[in-house]
Amino acid sequence: MSDAPKTSGMTRLRNYFLTGFVVCAPLAITAYIAWSFIGWVDSWVKPYIPARYSPDTYLPFPVPGFGLIVALILITLIGFLTANIVGRAIVNFGERLLGRMPLVRGIYGSLKQIFETVLSNKGDMFRQVGLVEYPRKGVWSLVFVASEKETEINQKLDQAGDPLIAVFMPCTPNPTTGFLMYVPKSDIVLLDMTIEDGAKLIVSAGLVAPEVKQMVVVNGEPIDGVLANPSVAALAQPARSSRTASSRPNK
């Protein structure tokens, strides 16, 4: 008789602790990452700031984030200067110098192309999330589908009506690493989730899944959302799978 209230009280304390942990852990990790990033940038930028322009010289404590602010201002200023004719000429001259260095030109060219693709407004990067059968038949892996572009690989391996598409299969829980694969279009099952939802699914190892839209079937056709008063005949029809015949791999 006396154990019941004690067990109930311990259960409540455990639930309170878990609730507080769920609230505090993301905040603490986010603050730690932000603080570490600010400290890392400050450690690189502050040594190059003249002492008379640094607030650390006049204050008894260091000012966190001052180096980050200076870096942002300098990057913006460089972008402004590069946008005019003189700036472009200087950048082109520097790139020609780097192009004459055997090892440096390959590294610089690759990094520049990656950053231009990621940061450019015209670069679409990954356009959709999909599934492919990997590493064996019957086992499905989440992939990010890149835009369809004609490459030498397509010219060598494409089959009529079924082109190869570049897909990136990220690793869990670090989506920045993974495998680049060229898969026939018919073997890719496209999903409705966004790229952000797919990244969350990868990072959380499947624990954080996006919400699924409810499908209502009327006259044999699935409709997104919920209808006000569906008919009895419509309710009696079995709902189709979201994986339609057109999206199934052709085996």
Image (spheres, rainbow, N blue to C red):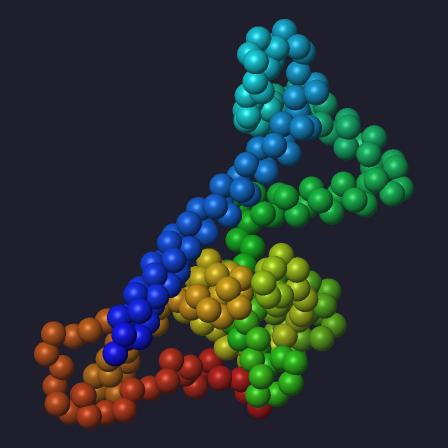
Residue 206 image position (x, y, % from top left): 49, 70
Residue 84 can be seen, yes or no:
no
Q: Residue at x 37, y 85 (%)?
A: 241
- Looking at the figure, which quarter contains the N terminus? bottom left
**Looking at the rendering, which quadrant does residue 176 occupy?**
bottom right
**Looking at the rendering, which quadrant does residue 62 occupy?**
top right
Q: Relative to the observer, which residue lies in front, 114 or 34? A: 34
Residue 151 image position (x, y, % from top left): 69, 63
Residue 97 can be seen, yes or no:
yes
Query: Does 20 appear above or below 208?
Result: above
Residue 215 image position (x, y, % from top left): 28, 78
Furthest-left residue in this view: 229
Q: Residue at x 61, y 32 (%)?
A: 39
Q: Relative to the observer, which residue lies in front, 194 or 109? A: 194
Query: Does 32 appear above or below 183?
Result: above
Furthest-front residue in this view: 2
Q: Residue at x 26, y 87 (%)?
A: 220
Q: Relative to the observer, which residue lies in front, 183 or 130? A: 130
